[in-house]
Image (tube, rainbow, N blue to C red):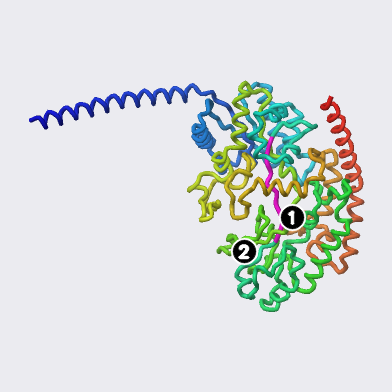
Amino acid sequence: MKLKKTTALLWCMILLISGTTGCTRGKEAAKTDRKKESKTEIVWRVHLPISEKDKEIIPDKESWSKQIDKILEKENKNYKVEVAFFYDPDDGEPADLPLKFLKECRDKGSKTDVITVLSGRTNMADIKNSISMYSTCAENDIFLPLDEILSSTKGDKIRAVIPKTDLDYSKINNIIYGLSATQPTYMGTAYSKDILDQCNIQKEELSQNIFENEEILKKVKTITGIAPYRIYSAYFVPEVLGYWIQQPCQTLGYGPDHKFINVTETEEYKQYINKLFNWKKSGLLDTICDKENGIEGTAFATSLNMYGLDNYRTEPYEITIPTGSKEETFYIIPDTGLPYMAPYFGDNKVGISSWTKNKEYAFDFMEELLTNKELANFLQFGEEGNDYSLNGNNQVKLNKQSSNVITRHFGYQYTNPLITLPTEAMSRDKLAYASGFQEKFYGSLPKGFRFDFISLAKEIQDCNNVYKPYTTEKTGGIPNPTANQLFSLNCENVEQTIDELNRQLHSAGIDKIIEAANKQLDDWKAAKDISSVADSK
């Protein structure tokens, strides 16, 4: 009997405790709900690289907002984020459409706290209908200046994960309005693992410099009977000579004497083209551009851009990529003597809107975008399990069937790619990698100078019609026979063909472009010196 009473009493106590706990939990849940409801909402306006008409690939902004809030909840933030997209123009629409949208938001006072802009549209078919978004936004009072807050202790977290060089390149008229970190790339060569095995070639035998592997290429040609090195065309050569090419002018490069020059008139250009020409003549190289139906089969060696690969490592590695209907393994050898010189890398930036009423929260969220690793991984790669998985080395493997086109190809522009998980083609310590690259190659560049190409649109258009990719009437456009012969390496005399190309470039206005670019640079340096003197007083 005593046992039954004790049991009954025990049950009463359990029920009482459970009831009390339930009430407590209910109160806590209510508090949490009220806390969520009382949070300040900030608006993040996100520039998408697509037209509003591309509805099938526009991300779900509610899903973005929900995931962002979930991540911020772990940091006990007192605000929540509403994601609002704005878009690039559709074909035929003016390039400044996104700028006009932001100016309208500003003038109407539409709620906007943080803004991410992409590079803007460079219309190669109509260069005057182009825009550089960051610089024009800065000039049109879209962003708040960030220098004061970045130089204070509040900027410590951001300065710890963005190289100083990137901060310097964020300056417009010596003022920082927006931030981004760039992950620079080395060029290199992809070697077929199957053909390496077939020809019994050890990886250690291969040099970074493709031209130092000539004897190996001859061996492969003897065994396989096909040209071992394959490129699309020689159009790309200015980019592999270490010059900072001023897009959209394809041959305007920043030279070693700190002046702009025409790259196709340099000895380096002539020598590189000659090497390619001689290899094609001897059967060691083939070009794809002049093959109407392409080339079947896998080449022994190809330039990385043949497979759309961007390399962010200095050491060799293996990678498996889809080629047609199957996957193949390639051995990648980066060439640390061939940097891709692109200090702005699109010039995408995140900043605080000039009309925000939530400056503290806006800065805090901008800081999270650039320093929060979980948030950065979500924005660059999507959701783990759905958009990507991790291999045994904790490297990101993008899922083939992912429909997340924006994060898959452009996500790095919405966050800091130096703090995200690496893919197989990325260094594990991306911050150290980027800082080392920039110190080595960007040190002598004019940090913050941006070439104003709009004022030279006609001359650049005319020059690009001379130095244009291999073109046939079937592929569209009017071909330039001289360029076609040179880029397909089908000319009889390389020197004469290069001379003819340069003669055409001079007639098209390359000298005016060079003169104007150097004047812009001199004016920029003078203005920077005046600003530096004023700042020191």
Foreground pick, 172 / 128: 172
Which structural element holds mark 1? loop
What residue is drawn where x is 79% and y is 61%?
Answer: 487
What residue is drawn where x is 72% and y is 35%?
Answer: 134
Looking at the rendered image, the disc whose residue lies closer to the viewer, 1 or 2, is 2
Q: In the figure, 45 relative to 286: above or below?
A: above
Q: Residue furthest left?
A: 1
Q: How many marks?
A: 2
Quadrant of image for the N terminus:
top left
Amino acid type at image mark 1: Gly
Q: Earlier in the sequence, mark 1 or mark 2?
A: 2
- Using residue 2 as the reference point, say whether residue 289 is left or right of it: right
Which structural element holds mark 2? strand
Foreground pick, 511 / 425: 425
Residue 231 x/y as whole percent: 72, 63
Marks 1 and 2, how far apart at CA:
33 Å
Q: In the figure, 222 relative to 330: above or below?
A: below
Q: Main secondary structure of the magenta part?
A: loop
Foreground pick, 18 / 524: 18
Q: Which mark is residue 476?
A: 1
Q: Which residue is mark 2?
A: 330
Q: Is residue 509 magenta?
A: no
Q: Check disc 1: other Cα within 10 Å, few if <14, some if 14-19, many if 20+.
A: few
What residue is drawn where x is 51% and y is 51%?
Answer: 389
The magenta stretch is 179-188
Residue 428 x/y as whole percent: 61, 51
Foreground pick, 348 / 219: 219
Amino acid type at image mark 2: Phe
Kindly tell me whether residue 43 is visible in this rendering.
yes
Residue 34 x/y as whole percent: 44, 22
Quadrant of image for the C terminus:
top right
